[in-house]
Amino acid sequence: MFTPPLDTTPTPDERQRFLRLLRTALAERRFQRLLLGRHEGEDTSIERLTVRDIELRGERALSFLWRHKTKDVTKNHPLDEGLALIDGLLGSDFQQAHLDTLGEEVQLRFSRKGKPLLQVGKKGGAGASAADDDTGAGEAATPGGHDRAKPRELSADRPFWRDLGVTHELKGQPALVPAMARKWKQINKFIEIFGAAVRKAGLDAPQETQRPVRVADFGSGKGYLTFAMHDWLRAQGLAPRVQGVELKQDMVALGNAAAARHGLEGLSFEHGDVRERGDQPLDVMVALHACDIATDYAMHFGLRSGARIIMCAPCCHKEIRPQMTTPAALRPLLQHGIHLGQEAEMVTDSLRALLLELMGYDTQVIEFIALEHTSKNKMVLAVKRPQDPTPARRAELLAQLDEIKRFYGLRSQALETLLRVEGKLEAA
């Protein structure tokens, strides 16, 4: 009996439907990103491709971020040329595609026999499927809103994580070192907050993608967050220029060696202290666990540098506590040393938040990681507003500042002193 040969040519219907959905999302400005995975092309170093919609010299274009094992390559294409390139890659070089739009998630995958299978779902609802993307370390989402696994902002398969001791090789694949599980969770939580701040500050807006995003990470240590910010920004199709500043020379050498080994352009480390730093233009200033008034100097540096985002996790609140006189109404509470210390921390960070708001920032004091992971879990997050506070609001904030100082009998606070020397706290 004659058996016809197996036809492995992809049926055009589902594949063409996916392409139509892609073109419609672009035309209606609902497109967010396209991720192509399961690479089977000739270049075995390619892991995945991320496509974003950008604007270059007033014209729309598609930015292709080719993620290799040891480097990333970005190429921009005119809209029609980019769509034609995607068409040629689907089902040949890449066997899976995930389209994110405003309101929908669309996944196309090809079976081993080359048959295209399409899945379309509303975001957060049944039918939405997991992306084979770069936001997680192998975590899959399950249909149905609350039952979906929480996505990770970072991927643990980046080779630099092994250099930093976060991952190791297990059965030929990168795997998280068990002792680093808490640290990995902290890093991802930080990037979640960092990403939201970048979007709020508009640093990912189309008109911003034509210049580097300038980041300084003071007290960068081993560079976990420095590498993470650089990696996340590149994954968004942005051009990061991230600098880690650290007092320990061996940490500086480690970071630079890893960045050079993996071809991470726009990432560097140098020896230095925020208090001795000359002015430099910045978009993001990060200082985690700077001791005592070093946090104030870091905030002041961020203000001088015109940073649109300031992220500080304060440590060692030593300046305010010796100055505090206990208000009569609080004496029963603050007679206990632990409560007095907690009150001093609260007052210090509240004053910092008020001062940053005076300088034109939307400011929050938040818990950026659960207390079970670290006792240094508080962050002062400030994102620059389009407009400075009105004279009336400024007067209100200055009055609040003076009232807090009067209530606790405070004579000085480092950030306030630095700003007063520059004449920036004068009434409007």
Image (cartoon, rainbow, N blue to C red):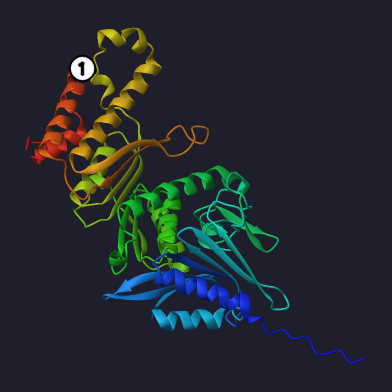
Among the 4 quarters of the image, the one containing residue 79: bottom left
> Between residues 314 and 424, which one lies in front from this camera angle?
424
Outermost residue on the bottom side: it is: 2
Where residue 404 appears, x then y in whole percent? 21, 22
Where residue 374 appears, x then y in whole percent? 48, 35
Q: How many marks?
A: 1
Amino acid type for the residue under numbered disc 1: Phe
The answer to whether residue 284 shows anywhere in this view is yes
Q: Is residue 350 left or right of residue 182?
A: left
The residue shown at (62%, 81%) is 12
Task: Tell me the residue that label 1 is attached to.
Answer: 407
Q: Residues within 10 Å of mark 1 (few under 14, many from 20)?
A: few
Question: Can you say which quadrant of the picture contains the N terminus?
Answer: bottom right
The residue shown at (12%, 32%) is 395
The residue shown at (38%, 36%) is 366
Where residue 257 appears, x then y in whole percent? 44, 63
Outermost residue on the right side: it is: 1
Q: Is residue 328 left or right of residue 17?
A: left
Among the 4 quarters of the image, the one containing residue 77: bottom left
Q: Is residue 386 left or right of residue 124?
A: left
Where residue 51 appears, x then y in whole percent? 46, 71
The answer to whether residue 245 shows anywhere in this view is no
